[in-house]
Amino acid sequence: MFEPNVPKMFFEFDDFGSEDPDLAATNPMYWYLHEFFANPAHPKSNDVSVYRNYVQQLGPSINISNKVKCNFHASVTRQVGNRLFQEKRFRAALEKYNESICWAKADSEELALGYANRSAIYYEQKEYEIALFNITLARKHRYPAKLLPKLLTREFNCKKNIANDCRDNSTYPELDFTIKTNNKRPSVAQDIQIKQIPKYGRGMVANRAFQVGEVILCEQPIMSSIDTQVKFLNCDFCSSTHFHSLIPCPNCGSVMFCNEECLEKGLKFIHRFECGIAEKLHHIRTDHYLGIRMFFYGLSLFEDNIEEMMKFCKSHPKSSETNPFKIDFTTADRLKQFELFHKVQDKNRYELNDEIVFRFLAALYYEVYLTHPTVKSIFAKQCHKNFMLHSFLDYIRTAAFMKIGPGQHYTEQLFLFAALCNHSCDPNTLSLHTENQLKFIVLRPIAENDEILISYGPLCWDHSADKRHSILRNMYFKCRCDVCVPTDGKFAFNIIKSVLEHPTLPSIDIFLFAPYVTLKEKLHGLQRYIEYFASIAHPNDELYEAIDAYGYNLRLAFKEDLGTKLRKTMIS
């Protein structure tokens, strides 16, 4: 298939994290689960309370110290960053500078030095707007007067280079909605509705034809979570990288936020329940953590009144009729969105070992959270503790059910609308996920009454059937798409028809490798190619190669577009 030969840019949004392909070997939860299942006495009961008793008696006991602000540790960490900077290992240096900023006490010289050192990295990478942003932060936080001339020189040079900048800073309007959106659901195109699909259950269906390249959904997550590996590189609340130019939690040294707005929201809805035990939570973090966060998000909406939350949950039982398409999102508040999540009826039938893992995780998170003073004071009564434990398990299941693919770039998100879109190994729509935005962009022409289908990860042209099923198995999902479980023979018939009538298609190389072809021109050319041949030669290997290349270049354009907008935001 299409294999791009493009050099990796320094500030691509997904270029950080572990290079170790065997993450299980370094994930403590892997070993805790291994020990749990290896113990012949491990519970198999349906009652999650039994798992709580097991963890309380046999562990694991999570004894991880929290990171308390310390200027000495900030200085040591920053000096490690300086050595990496001298070696021109800029990415590693940036991560160390961010860790130093987290360690540093509020309004200390160490905090200012961390921001100033970080500005030097951005200056070296010609990211002058971001360098200026960090220079401003350094000057706001007691930057030493004896070093100020050097910082002012860098500031002057940044402004000079911005004035003389010849970069193409244009955005990509075609990546925004170019069609009418729904008045009550601004994140979804108007001509999309939910229908019952015989094979899948509910699914998104087009009320009119959509063309290749049209954006039909643009949604932000209701909840995000980041992997421990990127805790100094991504916002703890919204999961954005923000060019990794982040600000620290003022109270602990464990997390960062992309700006003051996210810091305020993070403290209000989530982090105040985690601040002080964040290192313990990082130690046992899994991709099921979203469900736990949704519980505390809901609690914050009731202003920590656990009795009110319990009444609400009891009066809003699970329902198969839960449908965000029936809600007016121009007036819906956060509580209404939480209600949609809470009422989702999980239709998955998990295997016994999966259920056991969910119960074990719920019990372990329960034990860790009860070490937090705020949580301990709220859940003082046994009935409240039981509610938290059972809600943890319920929300872990719900979040697993709502996922629409594996985590992207060490992040996990929950989406209310996108979660209704079904999977196909031969999708007609691209799920484009960068920063804290998700877009659905049409990959192949969609006819009226066609179901809108995305891939949850595997693709028929990139993965064997066994590999596809293995990927989806990790998401507790069994594929029933037309490629994996053909019901009417249509897919196989179209393969034969395509091979007989169009054994070869024109090469797409002219769109990809011709000199001086811009990214916008590549996208336009591939779009026209797919529009024409998809109706007469699908499925076809050359067509799949064009679709693959189109998706790759859309992702590049999305990153460029977001980068340009972020720079403009920072300089303003």
Image (cartoon, helix red, strand yellow):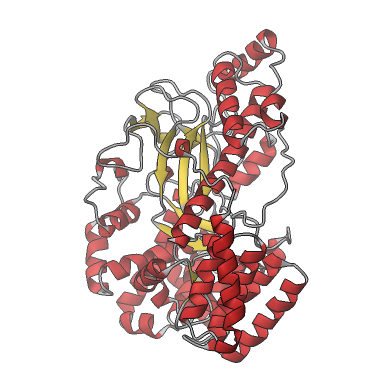
Q: Residue at x 45, y 81 (%)?
A: 250
Give whichever of 380, 260 is nearer the camera: 260
- Furthest toward the right, the residue is 87
Is residue 514 visible in the rendered image? The answer is yes
Find residue 223 and report its horizontal and vertical position in percent.
41, 59
Compared with residue 255, is residue 16 higher up or lower down, i.e. above or below?
above
Relative horizontal placement of residue 10, taking residue 319 as reference (left or right): right
Name the quadrant containing residue 6.
top right
Is residue 98 visible in the rendered image? The answer is no
Tally of numbered tags: 0
Find residue 229 and report its horizontal and vertical position in percent.
62, 67
Compared with residue 462, is residue 250 higher up or lower down, i.e. above or below?
below
Q: Residue at x 63, y 45 (%)?
A: 471
Find residue 527 and report its horizontal and vertical position in percent.
55, 26
Compared with residue 391, is residue 206 higher up or lower down, i.e. above or below?
above
Q: Residue at x 66, y 57 (%)?
A: 10
Relative horizontal placement of residue 449, taking residue 248 as reference (left or right): left
Name the quadrant containing residue 2.
top right
Give whichever of 209, 138 is nearer the camera: 138
Name the quadrant containing residue 186.
top left
**Image quadrant containing the N terminus:** top right
Q: Residue at x 67, y 86 (%)?
A: 76
Find residue 450 and report its horizontal and vertical position in percent.
43, 24
Relative horizontal placement of residue 567, taking residue 326 as reference (left or right): right
- Furthest toward the top, the residue is 501
